[in-house]
Image: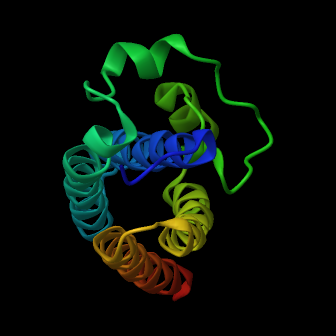
C-alpha cells in the first residue's frame, strides 16, 4: 500500500481539498469577473484544478483506502473560512461563496490565488518527498509543476493589472 500512515492519508485528503476548493474558487471568480482576459485565466485555472482532483482521486484514493470522491456536500458542511486569509486556506474545507465576498475585486482575488498556488507548489513537493513509490513522487512533482504554471499565469495577470 502506498500510504500506510495516518499523516500520509491526511496529506491525500488535503491535496484533494486544495484542488476542490481551487476549482470552486476559480470557477466562481470566472462567473463574477467581467474582464475577458481575467475571466479566461480563471476558467483555465478552474479546469486545471478539476483535472488535478481527478488525478488525485484516481491515483491516491484507492491507495489511501478511500473509496469515494469528496462531494460538494462534504465541502459545504465543514467549518467556514477563517478570516485570516492564510495561504494554506485551500487545504481547509471552506465556504467558497464567503471567500468570494471577501475578495471583492479581481486584484484581491489574484493575490489570494497567488498565495494559495505558491503554497500548493510547496505542498505537492513535500508530498512527493514523503511518497514511497516512484510513481507517487512523479505524479506529485507533476502537480507541483502545474501549480508553478498557475503561479506564473497569476503573476503575469497581476503585472498587467498594475500597468496603466
Residue furthest right as drawn: 84
Residue 16 spot, x, y in % from top left: 40, 44
Residue 36 spot, x, y in % from top left: 23, 64
Residue 32 spot, x, y in % from top left: 34, 42
For the residue pair 75 and 107, the one nearer the viewer reads as: 75
For the residue pair 34 and 57, the one nearer the viewer reads as: 57
Q: Answer above or below: position of 59 versus 161.
A: above
For the residue pair 53 and 95, the one nearer the viewer reads as: 53
Q: Is residue 143 left or right of residue 47?
A: right
Query: Residue 119 is drawn in which quadrant?
Result: bottom right
At 64% from the left edge and 18% from the top edge, which residue is drawn?
A: 79
Q: Answer above or below: position of 96 versus 80.
A: below
At 35% from the left edge and 32% from the top edge, which residue is drawn?
A: 65
Q: Answer above or below: position of 60 versus 162.
A: above
Residue 103 spot, x, y in % from top left: 59, 45
For the residue pair 40 and 164, the one nearer the viewer reads as: 40
Determine if residue 104 is in view: no
Amino acid at each position: 500500500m502506498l500510504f500506510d500512515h495516518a499523516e500520509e492519508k491526511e496529506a491525500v485528503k488535503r491535496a484533494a481539498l486544495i484542488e476542490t476548493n481551487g476549482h470552486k474558487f476559480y470557477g466562481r471568480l470566472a462567473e463574477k469577473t467581467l474582464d475577458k482576459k481575467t475571466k479566461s485565466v480563471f476558467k483555465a485555472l478552474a479546469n486545471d484544478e478539476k483535472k488535478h482532483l481527478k488525478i488525485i482521486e484516481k491515483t491516491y484514493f484507492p491507495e489511501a483506502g478511500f473509496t469515494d470522491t469528496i462531494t460538494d456536500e462534504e465541502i459545504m458542511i465543514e467549518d467556514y473560512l477563517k478570516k485570516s486569509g492564510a495561504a494554506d486556506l485551500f487545504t481547509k474545507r471552506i465556504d467558497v461563496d464567503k471567500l468570494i465576498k471577501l475578495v471583492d475585486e479581481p486584484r484581491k482575488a489574484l493575490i489570494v490565488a497567488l498565495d494559495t498556488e505558491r503554497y500548493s507548489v510547496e505542498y505537492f513537493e513535500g508530498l512527493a518527498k514523503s511518497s514511497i513509490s516512484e510513481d507517487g513522487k512523479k505524479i506529485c512533482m507533476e502537480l507541483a509543476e502545474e501549480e508553478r504554471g498557475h503561479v506564473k499565469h497569476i503573476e503575469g495577470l497581476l503585472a498587467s493589472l498594475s500597468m496603466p
